[in-house]
Amino acid sequence: MGLKMQLTMNRFFLLFGLTFLALTPLNAQDLCNRANIRIGTVESDGTVRDRSNMRIGQFEPDGTIRDRSGLMVGLIEANGVIRDRSYMRIGEIEKDGTVRDRSSLMIGQVEPGGTVRDRSYMCIGYAEGVKPEYAAVFFFFNLFKIEK
């Protein structure tokens, strides 16, 4: 096989591989309700989509949370504190996944495997592979104003 043919095949496999990776579920993680029905998706770039695949928001790398219009609706600080658009503390997620409201009362838990539980330890959803901070905002603080 000639060098030109080998380069063409290498380009084909590279393009195929990149396309495959772009379309795999590893690039988007589902948020599901307690019945394990998809209610949203968080893509690898932080884009949040609803069950109809409509873009409803964005988690920015700096912790800023934006709605579908690009307006800031909140912020996740590096220490896990979650703030609303007025920078008022509305809650936090601790390193162990415990979610607390503005009064520091425990309102739920995001387990390492992605199961999301309320204060009574009842399963309210699943967020496997989703950052716990994102799951906390989505399930407990509903900054995107979506129906579940």
Image (cartoon, helix red, strand yellow):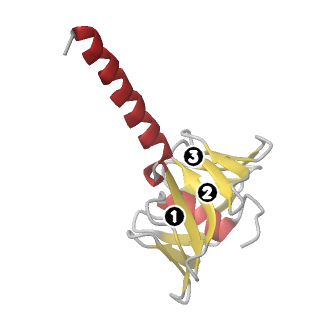
The foreground one among 128 and 25 is 25
Q: 104 above or below 43?
A: below
User: Do the numbered discs 2 and 1 sit on residues whose CB atoms are within 8 Å?
Assistant: yes
Image quarter in which the C terminus is found: bottom right
Left or right: where does residue 31 sit relative to residue 72?
left
- Asked if residue 102 shows in the view, the reply is no
The residue labelled by disc 1 is 93
Q: Residue at x 54, y 88 (%)?
A: 122
Estimate how packed mark 1 is, as few (under 14), some (14 to 19) or many (20 or more) residues with alpha carbons within 10 Å: many
How far across and down, in percent of the image, does residue 103 sit? 64, 72
The amino acid type of the residue labelled 3 equals Gly
The correct choice, above or below, for 136 with respect to 65 in the image is below
Choose top left, top right, bottom left or bottom right for residue 20.
top left
Type of the residue with mark 2: Ile
Q: Is residue 98 left or right of residue 125?
A: left
Is the C-beta separation of discs 2 and 3 under 8 Å? Answer: no
Where residue 75 appears, as percent x and y from the top left, is 64, 49
Query: Which residue in the structure is indicated by mark 3?
Result: 46
- Mark 2 or 3: in front is 3
Residue 107 percent across, percent down from the top left = 59, 78
**Hey, what amino acid is under mark 1?**
Ile
Task: Give the distance between the C-alpha atoms of the residues marked 2 and 3, in whole angstroms.
Answer: 16 Å
Please give left or right for residue 45 compared with residue 139 in the image: left
- The crowd level at tag 2 (other Cα within 10 Å; few <14, some 14-19, many 20+) is many
- Mark 2 highlights which residue? 82
- Residue 19 is labelled as none
**SS at circle 3:** loop
The location of residue 108, given as percent across then percent down, is: 55, 77
The mark nearer the N terminus, 2 or 3, is 3
